[in-house]
Image (cartoon, rainbow, N blue to C red):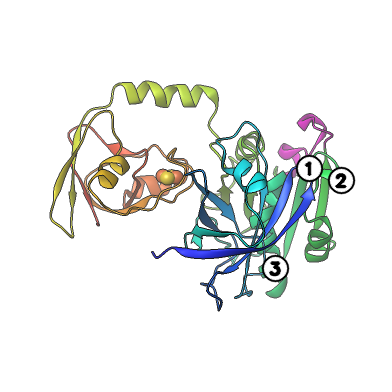
Amino acid sequence: MPDLELKVTAIKELTPSIKLFELVRAVGGELPPFQAGAHIDIRTGNGLIRSYSLANDPTDRDRYVTAVLREPNGGGGSKWMHDELKVGDVVTSSEPLQNFPLNERAPLSILLAGGIGITPIMAMGYRLRAQRLPCHLHYCTKAPEDTAFMDEVKALYGDHLTLHHDGGDPSKGIDLKETFATPPDGAHVYICGPPGLIRAAQEATAHWPQGTVHVELFTSARTEEETAEIAARAGADQAFEIELTHSGETLTVPADKSILDVLLDSGFGVPYACEEGWCGACVIDLVAGKADHRDEVMSDAEKAANTRIQVCISRALPGEKLVLDL
Ligand code: FES
């Protein structure tokens, strides 16, 4: 997929820690279309690639709008966006990518946004309103002054909005168990926010029908125990082979390297961003071979189907050779 050169045309402070960025095509003209829930991967000037959800109306063809939370303890992408990026600068980004699509056939969409997780939910709001689709948004933030897009959210969701301000203590916020106790017939849930909220919401919706709960991650939602387990598994990793259908090449993935590392070292321009298995950027179609799926992007059903693989983190099961559509 070709890269886009995007010019920053506006930066606005939405809250003390969240900034809005408006981006247009640097050479002018229309941008590639996007659907509600989509994101773009921006190359930050400090050498990182970071995924940012698009918040504006998907019918806009001349601009992308995103919002970024400054994370002082993050990897540096958000700090660069906040502190270095200026109006008039040009950044390189992917075309819009979609891991969080809206199911427009659902009779009811329930949306749960925590903090900066409101960005894709904004674009969904435009789409839901345009299609007059039944929905309800639960928007959770610390306090009114920490609530990005407050006026726009109220305008988009109207009476179908519940604001939850917890003052920084999640136990004083939304009661997720009660909110998601009974799945309405055919309803789908969309969850986007910090890892703690996502984990709690996944637990609260664990009894919902398969395929009705959708999650968009901005960072890994793994617990410390899960992260430790992944690290322990990585210590026992073995080398395996991958075969590339288009070139016919066979490459060896050493125990201490990922498939992504090997592909990049061999000159393949594979898209990637987080390199931790949660953003979905590095997905490749899997033609044959059983993979050890370690990502947080695909559902259990998708992992069982074994037709795609996130090459930054997943590997081959012991004794398997993976054939990639590349
Ligand atoms: S680069 Fe993010 S899932 Fe692989």
Q: Which mark is residue 144?
A: 2
Residue 176 among those drawn in magenta: yes
Quadrant holding the N terminus = bottom left
Q: Mark 3 or mark 2, which is nearer to you?
A: 2
Left or right of residue 278, residue 155 in this image: right
- Residue placed at 79% from the left, 30% from the top? 169
Q: Earlier in the sequence, mark 1 or mark 3?
A: 3
Image: magenta residue range: 166-179
Q: Earlier in the sequence, mark 3 or mark 2?
A: 3
Task: Give percent across and percent down for residue 58.
Answer: 62, 70
- Residue placed at 52% from the left, 54% from the top? 42
The residue that disc 3 covers is 126
- Disc 1 + disc 2, Cβ < 8 Å: yes
- Disc 3 versus disc 2: distance between alpha carbons? 22 Å
Task: Give percent across and percent down for residue 262.
Answer: 25, 41
SS at mark 1? Answer: strand
Q: Quadrant of residue 203?
A: top right
Residue 131 among those drawn in magenta: no
Left or right of residue 57, residue 248 in this image: left
- Residue placed at 61% from the left, 75% from the top? 62
- Disc 1 versus disc 3: distance between alpha carbons? 21 Å
- Disc 1 + disc 3, Cβ < 8 Å: no
Number of other residues with Cα within 10 Å of mark 1, as a class: few under 14, some 14 to 19, many 20 or more: many
The residue that disc 1 covers is 141
User: Visible in this render: residue 300?
Assistant: no
